[in-house]
Image (cartoon, helix red, strand yellow):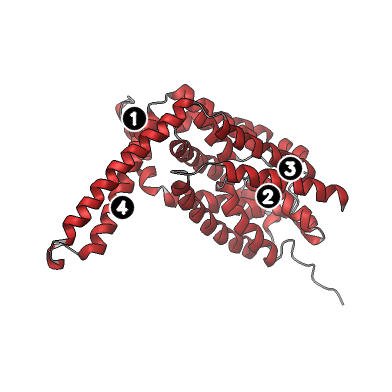
């Protein structure tokens, strides 16, 4: 009696890797590094099923689905911003000029993603085969932690000053909002147009929109060359263990951006790069590599979407007042622990 071959990817594998991918893609800790290390650390079938170094691994089709889901989460979170940016691109083509904030930012994103797009298109396979090994990913994860720590430790004064200016502006806005809420508290509920909660929610939404517009205005002024330099740092993320968003954040801070603006710019740069990388690999997903595991891919992608959305929402608030140092410590600790374990087991 013949027995059906087991699936190339199990549901527990899809659930764990999908959830970790969504968070680690946007946290500055390298999703590819975790995708390489975790299967190797677990061992057994996980190490066999979840290998990115094998040229024809079904795991590659799985990662395609996760990348598309992560990119969609970024687009969902920044959807209002992307409508403005895409509108800026279209109007710049129509008017044959680049003058507004949205137009400049659109072209900055396009120019900044060209280097990583070209290198990724021609060298992604080589990088993955040569460097997609667990022990190498562990060392690069340690290097990623050092980059994050150095980015905070040696951040230029211009970046620190930018943080202080944004904080001062936010404090003024908060004081205005507090005064507004005190004023609303004296107004009968029927005259508030929806009550205090609705008014507070609307004010919060307006504040977020205002902060986004102000951030984009600042980003659009750094220039195309600076944007190109920051975008080029993403090439390092082709090395398993180096975080795309992490190196872009550090690159942005070293070009004088506040931590918050550097994070925002890195996420805006990441969405088209991650989406393009996923779309280019869709034939793998729809081809023979995806046979028998498409339902597992769907499960993992849903978890990846949820994890990525929650991660970017958390990080955009986190970087307003906190540093990247905890992520640096995590990367060094996890990378060093992985090196020790992989060498002594």
The first of marks 4 and 1 along the sequence is: 1
- What residue would you read off at disc 2? 34
Q: Which mark is residue 137?
A: 3
- Whether tag 2 and tag 3 are in contact, CB under 8 A, the answer is no
Give the alpha-carbon distance from disc 1 to disc 2, as whole Å.
40 Å
Secondary element type, mark 1: helix
Percent across and percent down for residue 55 are 76, 45
- Dot 4: element: helix
Residue, x 60% and y 45% (percent of image)?
Answer: 327
Q: Which residue is mark 4?
A: 205
Upstream in sequence: badge 3 or badge 1 = 1
Query: With 294 as the anchor, is 252 left or right in this view?
Result: left
Mark positioned earlier in the residue sequence (2 or 4):
2
What quarter of the picture does the N terminus occupy? bottom right
The dot on residue 208 is none
- The residue lying at 56 percent from left, 61 percent from top is 303
Which numbered disc, 2 or 3, marks the residue that appears first in the sequence? 2
Q: Nearer the viewer, residue 280 or 249?
A: 249
User: How far is mark 2 from mark 3, CA to CA?
Assistant: 8 Å
Mark 1 / mark 2, whichever is N-terminal: 2
Mark number displayed over residue 92: 1
């Amino acid at each position: 009696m013949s027995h059906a071959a087991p699936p190339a990817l199990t549901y527990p594998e899809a659930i764990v890797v999908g959830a970790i991918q969504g968070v680690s893609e946007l946290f500055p800790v390298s999703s590819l590094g975790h995708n390489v290390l975790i299967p190797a650390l677990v061992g057994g079938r996980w190490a066999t099923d979840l290998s990115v170094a094998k040229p024809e691994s079904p795991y590659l089709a799985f990662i395609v689905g996760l990348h598309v889901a992560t990119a969609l989460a970024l687009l969902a979170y920044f959807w209002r911003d992307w409508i403005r940016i895409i509108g800026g691109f279209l109007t710049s083509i129509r008017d044959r000029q680049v003058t507004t904030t949205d137009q400049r930012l659109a072209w900055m994103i396009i120019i900044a993603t060209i280097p990583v797009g070209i290198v990724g298109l021609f060298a992604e396979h080589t990088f993955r085969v040569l460097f997609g090994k667990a022990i190498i990913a562990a060392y690069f994860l340690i290097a990623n932690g050092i980059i994050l720590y150095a980015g905070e430790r040696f951040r230029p004064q211009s970046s620190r000053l930018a943080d202080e200016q944004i904080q001062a502006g936010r404090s003024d806005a908060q004081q205005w909002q507090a005064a507004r809420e005190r004023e609303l508290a004296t107004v009968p509920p029927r005259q508030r147009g929806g009550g205090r909660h609705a008014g507070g929610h609307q004010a919060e939404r307006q504040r977020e929109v205002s902060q986004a517009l102000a951030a984009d205005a600042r980003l659009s002024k750094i220039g195309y060359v600076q944007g190109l330099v920051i975008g080029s740092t993403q090439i390092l993320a082709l090395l398993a263990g180096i975080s795309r968003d992490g190196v872009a954040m550090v690159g942005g801070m070293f070009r004088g951006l506040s931590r918050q603006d550097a994070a925002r710019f890195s996420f805006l740069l990441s969405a088209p790069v991650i989406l393009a990388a996923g779309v280019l690999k869709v034939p793998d997903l729809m081809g023979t590599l995806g046979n028998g595991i498409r339902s597992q891919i769907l499960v993992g992608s849903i978890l990846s979407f949820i994890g990525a959305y929650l991660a970017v929402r958390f990080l955009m608030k986190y970087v307003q007042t906190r540093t990247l140092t905890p992520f640096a410590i995590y990367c060094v600790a996890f990378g060093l622990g992985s090196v020790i374990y992989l060498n002594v087991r």
